[in-house]
Amino acid sequence: MLTTYTVENGQVLVREGPQPAAALRCAIWIDLLSPTQNEERDVQDALCLEVPTREEMQEIESSSRLYREGDVLFLTAPFLFGVDGGEMGSTPITFVLGEANLITVRYATPKAFSVFSARCLRNPQPLQGTSDAAMLHLMEQIVDRLADILERIAADMDRASRAAFRTARADVKVSRKDADLKEALLTLGEVGDVTTRANETLLGLSRILTYLNAEKGIGIRKENQTLVKSLVRDVRSLNEHAHFLNSKAQFLLDAVLGIINVEQTGIIKTFSVVSVALMPPTLIASIYGMNFEFMPELKWVAGYPLSLGLMVISAVLPIWYFKRKGWL
């Protein structure tokens, strides 16, 4: 889908679908969402540039993601999307930065794009400047969205950790305890996945900003350098926070696995004690269950109660010994 954002008389005009070359050249932001070949060709012919294909966007070499063709910069990075919808993933998005136009090529819709579009309709200020200013404002929205995600993830992690440790201390049914620990594991697994993908997005943004700073002669105008510096600081702080959350998630994951291991050890200990306690009575019963002709105890009047007594004593003694040693 081809969408253009043009500022006319202080208002943002949004147009969708095929458009003439003149309208494309006047647009400050051209958004290509899963573009067709005709849409790509219209943009390429109007602006005299080559729109990268989906396969080219997925290449991981730095030279394939960050490069310059004439006076146009091509900046590609993976971006996190779908955190709220449950179908989370990362998708490469390319920013094509020209002198007068910003083109974004994407095959998914991170929420930051929808929020930025709605924000521009309410207040056209982000699109009233230059194309590089529009790109930087869009990146600011992406960074703000990542900050919100990391804050929510931190809150989910705290709830999971409190639930896990509270369950470990509480005297509740085994089934409920297992369910709570399983839920904590799933939450921590999701936290690790989100923070890893957020780190990937922040790394991509950091590389783009570093590349923009290196391209002194083109790309970012002097009046927008303060926006770049602000973005660099925000990305660095979020990157550090994401690393902290990753470390905390790993610690909590180890702790929950340790709790599960302790619970399993207790269960195995119980079975071991029962097995040890039943071994001597089983031995006694096996001896007197043998079919030998000459077994004098079989003719004793007190033989039967004596064997039962031996079984009880041989079962109680190991349990008493284990408790005395503190193993139970």
Image (cartoon, helix red, strand yellow):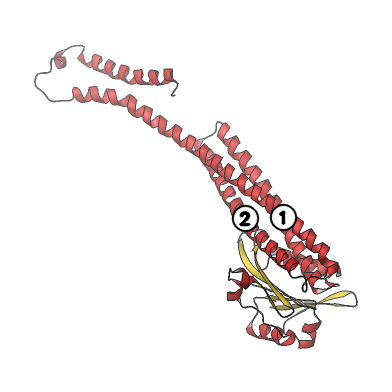
Q: Which residue is mark 2?
A: 194
Which residue in the rendered view is the most extreme toward the top?
Answer: 301
| Disc 1/disc 2 C-alpha distance (Å) | 18 Å
The amino acid on which the numbered mark 2 sits, given as a three-letter code, is: Val
Above or below — where is 208 with respect to 175?
below
At horizontal 45% and vertical 32% (from top left) the residue drawn is 266
Question: In x, y percent, where is residue 128?
Answer: 86, 72
Viewport quadrant of the C terminus: top left
Classify residue 111 by image quadrant. bottom right
How crowded is the residue under tag 1: few (<14 C-alpha within 10 Å), some, or many (20+)?
some
Q: Which residue is mark 1?
A: 236
Question: In x, y percent, where is residue 25?
Answer: 79, 83
Q: Compare residues 277 and 71 and report the one nearer the observer.
A: 71
At horizontal 38% and vertical 18% (from top left) the residue drawn is 321
Which residue in the rendered view is the most extreme toward the right?
Answer: 9
Residue 205's disc is: none
Using the rendered image of the protein, determine whether residue 155 is visible from the camera's viewpoint: yes
Viewport quadrant of the N terminus: bottom right
Q: Compare residues 168 and 144 and report the one nearer the observer.
A: 144
Above or below — where is 183 with respect to 171?
below
Total marks shown come to: 2
Question: In x, y percent, where is residue 276?
Answer: 33, 26
